Image (spheres, helix red, strand yellow):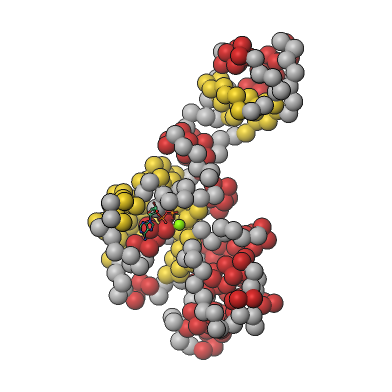
Amino acid sequence: MSEPVVVIDNLVKRYGEKLAVDHLSIEVREGEILGLLGPNGSGKTTTINCLLSLLHYDKGEIKIFGKKMSPQAYDIKKDIGIVLQNVAVIETLTVYENIEFFCGLYIKDKAKRRQYVEEAIEMVGLGDYVKYKPKKLSGGLLRRLNIACGIAHKPKLIFFDEPTVAVDPQSRNSILDGIRRLNQEGATIIYTSHYMEEVEELCSRIVIIDSGRKVAEGTEAELKAQIKSSETITVEMKEIPDFVITDIKDINHVYEVKKSGEKLIIKCDGGSHNLIHIMNYLTEKNIDFGRVNSELPTLNDVFLEITGKELRD
Ligand code: ADP
Ligand code: MG
């Protein structure tokens, strides 16, 4: 196998007493879209900033393209694209000028630069706004500009730190499509998010972190196969007598039954006709129920089983 594009080995970062990254090791292979999934405050941004040498760290080693990463490593940095969580553009320049400025840090040839800038504008769908100053852009458009500035020089490795937070659905879809295209054109992607749906949709492999520690990693299917839960059934019921909970717990493959408001939440660990068994039981006992829903496990279930906490905030 080829050398990984990024190797993080035993990274430790403290802010005073606070351990923000706790002996974290991750490898990223060429062509991947690696998702770094964790709740707010789990250490995603700190990890990215350490990786990019934007932040000093206490312990560990970081290699990018097989070379040790450092603040002076220009030969590494020219092949990296960075889209940071906090938008970083220049207020006095227009959309076009911003992208050209950032692209120009790496691409000196004018004709080539113009082509790259135009491709970036097309990629993020900012064609109608090239003459706008950042101040005039909506939140979503500003995020797209931030992305264009980070990727215009056609880097081989691109970091996206929560690029869709507080973004309208149209911009969000345009951002995710853009990332897929960059990946199809050959870029390796590291994508952080606390939205499990997004990571499931986009990423080829996922590392789940909590309190700066890696708690699980694998493809979406591998992660879901690691947990007990295989189906969550929700039944709406106005009144939920206690005996119903006890009886349903006795049904084959049911391992947890919980009341949540006017809903019964039933977790199953396999089996193929769980829903039918539960409906049959309720019908037999003449118990009134409303809407019924069956869901396959999500990455939230993975996070919940491993850490005992919800991923959602
Ligand atoms: P995430 O990006 O996953 O939301 P961060 O990397 O921003 O998480 O933060 C990880 C932890 O480190 C959090 O507990 C946060 O409060 C803390 N932290 C982040 N930046 C600083 C800082 N500059 N000084 C002190 N603590 C910080
Ligand atoms: Mg963050």
Identify which residue is drawn at 74% across, 25% down: 290
Q: Which quadrant of the frame does ligand 1 lie within?
A: bottom left
The residue nearer to you, when weighing 264 against 241, is: 241
| Residue at 71% from the left image edge and 10% from the top image edge | 285
Say which quarter of the image contains residue 294: top right
Q: Is residue 24 above or below residue 76?
A: above
The location of residue 80, given as percent across then percent down, is: 42, 70
Q: Residue at x 45, y 69 (%)?
A: 81
Image quadrant in which you'd find residue 123: bottom right
Task: Answer whether residue 285 is visible to the viewer in this image.
Answer: yes
Question: In this orientation, does residue 272 appear?
Answer: no
Looking at this view, is 250 or 259 the one in front?
A: 259
The N terminus lies in which quarter of the figure? bottom left
What is the number of callouts on the image?
Answer: 0
Residue sitting farthest toward the left:
59
| Depth order, front residue of 178/168 | 168
- Residue 228 is situated, as x and y percent measured from the top left of the image, at 48, 28
Question: Against 234, is 168 above or below?
Answer: below
Residue 178: horizontal and vertical position, in percent?
Answer: 59, 64
Left-right relation of 122 to 17: right
* Quadrant of residue 116 within the rendered picture: bottom right
Vertical comparison of 3 with 72: above or below? above
Does 61 sit left or right of 79 as displayed?
left
Q: Position of residue 308 (x, y in %)?
A: 44, 34
